[in-house]
Amino acid sequence: MKVNGPAYEIECSSVNDSIVFLPPGDEKRFSIRLFLKGAAMNRASGVPGRSRELLLGAFPRKGPLVAPQQVHGTDVIAASTGATLPARPSADGVCVDRSGIEASLRFADCFPVVIASLSPSPRIILLHSGYKGTVQNIAGRAARSLLGEKGAEPSETWAWIGPGIGKEHYFRKKGEPWTKRGIESFSRHCVSEDGNDVFFDLGGEIRRQLKGAGIVDEMICSVPLCTFRDNDVCYSYRKGDRENRLFLLAWME
């Protein structure tokens, strides 16, 4: 864990273990947690409303839940009452800028990315950055909008890159249209080839995108878990988890 920048800790629970994302210092306004492979998430089968219900005993509801239909795009919606369940607007990001409402996303090899800032007012942005989202720079776009259009201060803006599939395990076939797009858009340091397979370092590319948008390297925390390798604690679509998902849940106090 980092000491001076954002950090994380793994919290064990009889309900379901989770990763808690921690801003620097004693900042308590942000509650950001990724629920790992475990009893509650196994029962939830990737359904967001069911995932939240199974956690209520340990984590009382703070408001209605936003749980968009993830489509591997770049749209980020505001956490508003019009977007809460049972509505499922299509998006791959949620921005929370007030208390009284919860936001969530789900993952099984794609990367959870969280950006939080205190200026000019507190807000949390949750992102789903799989291969296609990373090719389309969802993390960089969101960070650039926050630091540019919203006027966030870099010294009070932090990012976390959660567990996703590692560079040794994520590959696509040469010649496919999306493979070509990745080769063209990723840093050459995040792409390698082995025969007809092209391997992509999604986590490394996401970090590069965040830095390119203006987030300071020391303010970015990466969780060193690979969903494919660490399939005992993470769900992995490529390892056969077709329904179960890691569940990212956040709200502001």
Image (cartoon, rainbow, N blue to C red):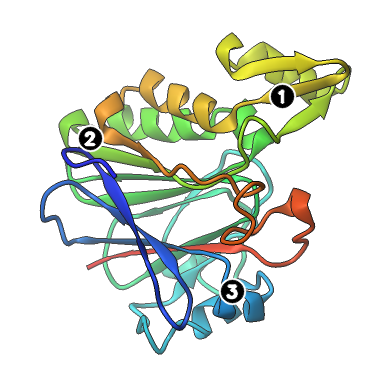
**Mark 2 or mark 3, whichever is nearer to me:** 3
**Mark 1 or mark 2, whichever is nearer to me:** 1
Badge 3 amino acid: Met
Judge left or right: residue 145 versus residue 198: left
The label number, if any, that marks residue 176 in the structure image: none
Say which residue label 3 marks. 41
SS type, badge 3: helix
Percent x, y of residue 239: 76, 53
Badge 3 or badge 1: first in the primary sequence: 3
Q: Is residue 20 above or below residue 253?
A: above
Which quadrant is home to the C terminus? bottom left
Judge left or right: residue 123 versus residue 53: left
**Real-space CA distance between mark 1 and mark 2, rounded to the nearest whole angstrom:** 34 Å
Percent x, y of residue 100: 30, 73
SS type, badge 1: strand
Badge 1 amino acid: Phe
**Residue farthest left in this picture:** 26
Say which residue label 2 marks. 152
- The quarter of the picture where residue 220 lies is top left
**Real-space CA distance between mark 2 and mark 3, rounded to the nearest whole angstrom:** 34 Å
Q: Which residue is drawn at 48% across and 76% down?
A: 16
**Real-space CA distance between mark 3 and mark 1, rounded to the nearest whole angstrom:** 29 Å
**Which residue is at the front of the view, 53 or 119?**
53
Badge 2 amino acid: Ala
Say which residue label 1 marks. 199
Judge left or right: residue 65 versus residue 218: right
Q: Residue at x 26, y 33 (%)?
A: 219
Q: Is residue 38 above or below residue 26?
A: below
**Residue farthest bottom in this picture:** 57
**Residue density around tag 3, few if under 14, some if 14–19, many if 20 or more, within 10 Å:** many
Which quadrant is home to the N terminus? top left
